[in-house]
Image: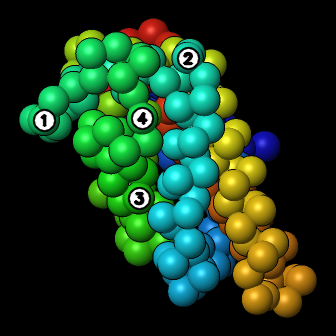
Amino acid sequence: MQQIDEERLETDLQYRYDYLVEFIGFGPGDVSLIQSSAPHLGPRIPELVEKTYHRLLSYDATARHFVPRQDGYDGDVPTDIAALSATHPQVQFRKDHLNRYFMQLIGRSYDAKMVLYLDMVGKMHTPKAGSASIDVPLVQMNALMGLLSDTLMQSIAEWPLDAPTAMRTAQAFNKLLWIQNDLINRHYRRSTA
């Protein structure tokens, strides 16, 4: 039986990531499938981003988080939730972030820098990073991750892949999204490193 330092899981990001990768079975083959999906996913990213933001802006509980000034955005902010639209410059700014997120998943090496990036994705939705006024509740982050998973799975099913490759690709993304979800959730617990 493997021994895991549970206290270290809470304080050492790389140790936590390595544990998740090993436990879930997210290996080099999964990374290769994700990266080799670039010709299929890349052209579909704008559509996936639009679908995601259509849903985010359809609920007041998620849309309200696009009213406060986003970190790094210098333009006009919406006056209130009623002033939000999919074409508002601040929403466009956030769409660009999601677009880059998908590009990072398919285009980066899964090394220590990627682990830091995945962790920052979680942290930036809390007051611990970026704008202090951004504090997206965990339930909304979990809803977003579920939506991204469903959207990706639907997209993969439409790619011109043989059934076994499509299944392995979906499994690879699923494993990655569970790792990402944990690296989001960790920022909603007690103080972390």
Residue 28 position (above or below residue 60): below
Q: Which numbered disc, 4 or 3, marks the residue that appears first in the sequence?
A: 4
Q: Is residue 35 visible?
A: no
- The residue sitting at the top extreme is 190
Decide if residue 124 is on the left or right side of residue 47. Answer: left
Return the residue at label 3. Answer: 99
Task: Single out the mark in the foreground, 3 or 1.
Answer: 1
The residue at the point 60 percent across, 51 percent down is 51
| Identity, as a three-letter code, of the amino acid under mark 1 | Gly
Is label 3 in a helix, a strand or a loop?
helix
Task: Tell me residue 6's x, y (percent).
Answer: 58, 26
Disc 4 from disc 1: Cα separation? 15 Å
Among numbered discs 2 and 3, the one appearing first in the sequence: 2
Q: Nearer the viewer, residue 111 or 160?
A: 160
Q: Earlier in the sequence, mark 4 or mark 2?
A: 2
Residue ID for mark 1: 75
Give me the C-alpha separation between circle 4 and circle 3: 18 Å
Asked if the residue under mark 3 is in contact with the one under mark 2, i.e. CB atoms within 8 Å, the reply is no
Please report the residue visible at 26 percent of the width from the left and 42 percent of the height from the top.
89
* Front disc: 2 or 3: 2
Q: Secondary structure at mark 1?
A: loop
The C terminus appears in which quarter of the rendering? top left
Q: Secondary structure at mark 2?
A: helix
How far apart are the alpha carbons under marks 4 and 2? 12 Å
Q: Which mark is residue 85?
A: 4
Provide residue 28's location: percent of width, then percent of height.
Answer: 59, 75
The tag earlier along the polypeptide, 4 or 1, is: 1
Marks 3 and 1, the one that precedes in the sequence: 1
Circle 4: residue type:
Ser
- Furthest residue toward left: 74
Residue at the spot 42% in from the left edge and 18% down from the top edge: 82
Q: Which mark is residue 60?
A: 2
